[in-house]
Each structure stands twice: as structure tokens, then as C-alpha cells.
Image (cartoon, grey):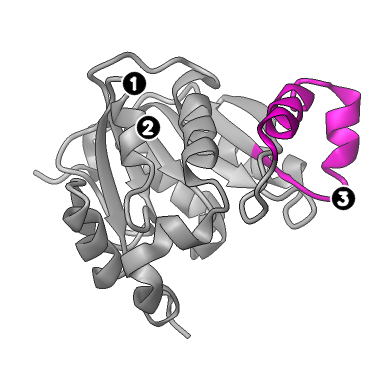
Amino acid sequence: MSTEDKYGPQAERWTEEAYANPARYLEHRAQLIAELGPPLQPGTRVLDLACGDGGLAAPLEARGLRYLGVDSSAEMVAAARARGVAAEQGDLNRYVPAAPVAATTVFRAIYYAADRRAFFHHAAGFTERKLVFDLNPRQFRLDEVRADLRSAGWTRLDLRPFFVPQTRGLWAPAGAALELAENSGPLARLALRFRFTYVCAASGHVAGPSTLPA
């Protein structure tokens, strides 16, 4: 089943139904996009690959960032535009923005890269500050991901555990406690052996013009 066939029918209410608490979940994700690794300054551009219905646009724009979403599903792009979000249809393996962006994000979709190392190299061609993505360490070996990033010219990788649950609502103090636990060092890494994900920010690569359209 293609991603279009899988996700297209869910596009109209994707954000509302995919997350138990969309505001908290997406705000925390936006915080890490802006702050993990090299910080993003207001006015800079974020390219959100596999953007779904553009739920990340609002919390990123609230931080003064300029947002462009890209998704392979025409239905998702239409749903994003209906929200007033700037969005285009495209495949994350091939899409190239009209101009370089400060950050490129890929959430819940890095496994759609046809070749992960080639994708990291592709993104480096138009990303000036950092590439931000989530990673399940039980599915992908961190040392292999580091090696792929390094081969594509990304020299730095910042990691942050992400403990806010996607599909389970929490009492506000419990959610706040989980966010604090993300900074608990060895305990957080132990928890990641069983569940949760990392948010990864790769940086240290200067965007080159070779992959940009003439």
C-alpha cells in the first residue's frame, strides 16, 4: 500500500485524531526543532518533509519561524492548505525547495527514505543549519545512523529523548514530569530500551548549491 493510499483517507482530521493531545505533543516537538542543536532564529525557514496536514506549522510560526510543508499525499496537502498552511506535494527522496532553508524536519517518516545515506546527502544540499528527525533506537542502530550522517557531511549530532506520548492523553502534571525525565541521562537512556524515541538534530554541514534548481 502506498503512503497516499494509507494516509489520504485520514487527511481531513489527521492532527485531531493522530494525537491524544495535539497541542502539547506538537508544541514540544516544535520546541526541540527550534532549540536542539544550533538554535533557529525568528524569520528563518523550516521545511517539514512528510508534513501530513501541517500540524507543526502553528507552533513553529508562533516562534517566528517560516514554515513550508511537503507531503506525498495530495489529500494531506489539501488538508494543510485548508488550515492556511503553506504546503506542496512532493516525495521526501526527491523534493528540493526553491531556496535553501535553515532547517529540514522529517518526523515519523525517516524510514520512507529509499536510501538513508543518500537522503542525508540530499537534505544537506539545501539545509543550512540542521536536519531534525525522530528515531526509534530499537529499530535503528544509533552508530549506523551516525555513520550515515557523517558520510553525508553532517559532523554533529545532538540527541534528546522524547517522552510525550502520541496516542495516550496524560494528566498535565504527569506530562510535565515526563518532559523533565527526558533530561535524566542514564535513566532516560534506559527507558529508551523499551519505548519512546529520540529527536535528533544533525548539523555542521554547509548547504551547497549543486542540488538547487537553476
Quote the CA–CA distance across marks 3 and 2: 29 Å
How packed mark 1 is, by other alpha carbons closer than 10 Å (few <14, some 14-19, many 20 or more), is: some
Q: Is residue 34 magenta?
A: no
Name the residue beneath numbered marker 3: 194
Please give left or right for residue 89 compared with residue 57 in the image. Answer: left
Asked which quadrant contains residue 50, the reply is: bottom left
Q: Tell me the SS state at disc 2.
A: helix
The residue that mark 2 highlights is 59
Q: Give the amino acid at mark 2.
A: Pro
Q: Residue at x 17, y 35 (%)?
A: 99
Question: Mark 1 sits on what residue?
Answer: 63
Disc 3 crowd rating (10 Å Cα; few below 14, some 14-19, many 20+) is few
Look at discs 1 and 3 and give the one toward the viewer: 1
Q: Secondary structure at mark 1?
A: loop
Contact between marks 2 and 1 (CB within 8 A): the answer is yes
Which range of residues does the magenta coloring cover? 171-198
